[in-house]
Amino acid sequence: MFGIEVNEIQVEKLFNAERAWSNLPFILEGVPLTLFVAVIGMAIGLILGFFLALARGSSRIWLRWPARFYISFMRGTPILVYLFVLYFGLPVVGLKLPATTAAIIGFGTNSAAYIAEINRASLNSVSNGQWESARALGFTYWQTIRRIIMPQATRIAIPPLGNVFLDLLKATSLAAMISVPEILNKAQIAAGRTVDSMTMYITAALIYWPLTMIFSALQDYLERRNNRYL
C-alpha cells in the first residue's frame, strides 16, 4: 500500500563498532559547541522568557498583546524554518550572521516562548495572598517578585524548565543544517568519509544519550534541593 520494499536485513551492517570507535574522537569534537549553543540558548530563553511571562500577564494591553503574538508565533512555526530565515534569509537584507550565532539566537528566542508559558503558569500558581501580604509590608512590585514570588515559583518551574533544556540540547542537532560543527554535523562528515551513515548516526545518538542523562541528574538534584523544606 505504501510502496515499502523489505529485503533481507543484514544486521552486521547496522553498526560497525570498530569504525564507530575510530571515528568517535572526531564526532566528540562537536560536544563543546553543542553544549555551548544549548547553554547560551537556554540562558537567553530564561531571561527573555521571564519578561515575556510578566508582559503576558500584564494588565497593560500594549505589553500583553505583543507578548501573546510573539509566543504564538514562536510556538506555531518550526524551529528549523526559523534557523533558515536567520542564516540564509537575513543576508538578503544585508545582515549575515555566523552559523553559531544564528543557532544561539534561534534556539534562545524560540525556547523563550515555551519558557514564558512555564513561567506564567508558575507565577500564577502562587496565591494572591502572597501579593497582598507583600503590599501590606510595603514591598514594591519588583521586591515582591524577587523576594517572595520567584522563590516559590522556581520550585514549580524547575521540572518543566529542565525538560525544555533537554529538548533544546537534542534540538541543537538541527544546527547541522546551517553548518554549525556540532555533534550531528561531525557525524555527517564522518558518514560521508566512511560511507557508513548508520554507524555514524547511531554513534551520535549514543553521545547525546549520556549528555541528557547528566543534565537529567542535575535537574533531579535541583528539584530535591528546592523541595527540601516541604
Image (cartoon, rainbow, N blue to C red):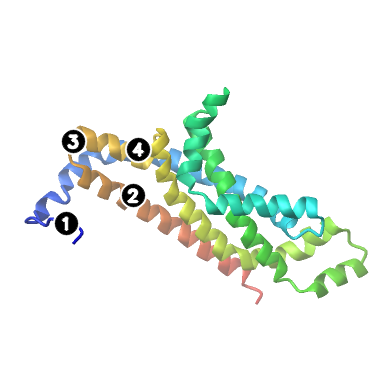
**Mark 1 or mark 3: which comes first in sequence?**
1
**Mark 2 or mark 4: which comes first in sequence?**
4
Cα separation, mark 1 vs mark 3, equals 27 Å
Q: Residue at x 53, y 39 (%)?
A: 104
> Label 3, on which residue?
194
| Badge 3 density bin: few <14, some 14–19, many ≥20, Cα 10 Å | some
Q: Are marks 4 and 3 in contact (CB under 8 Å)?
A: no
Cα separation, mark 2 vs mark 4, equals 13 Å
Q: Mark 2, mark 4: which one is toward the viewer?
A: 4
Q: Residue at x 21, y 47 (%)?
A: 198
| Badge 1 density bin: few <14, some 14–19, many ≥20, Cα 10 Å | few
Q: Are marks 3 and 2 in contact (CB under 8 Å)?
A: no
Considering the numbered disc 3 on the image, is that residue within a helix, a strand or a loop? Answer: helix
Q: Is residue 88 left or right of residue 56?
A: left
Judge whether residue 36 can be spotted in this image.
no
Q: Mark 3, mark 2: which one is toward the viewer?
A: 3
Q: Is residue 194 left or right of residue 209?
A: left
**Residue lying furthest front in this view?**
1
Q: Mark 1, mark 3: which one is toward the viewer?
A: 1
Q: Are marks 1 and 4 in contact (CB under 8 Å)?
A: no
> Label 2, on which residue?
207
> Label 4, on which residue?
185
Cα separation, mark 1 vs mark 4, equals 29 Å
The picture places residue 21, in percent across and down from the top left corner, at 22, 43
Considering the numbered disc 1 on the image, is that residue within a helix, a strand or a loop? Answer: loop
**Mark 4 or mark 3: which comes first in sequence?**
4
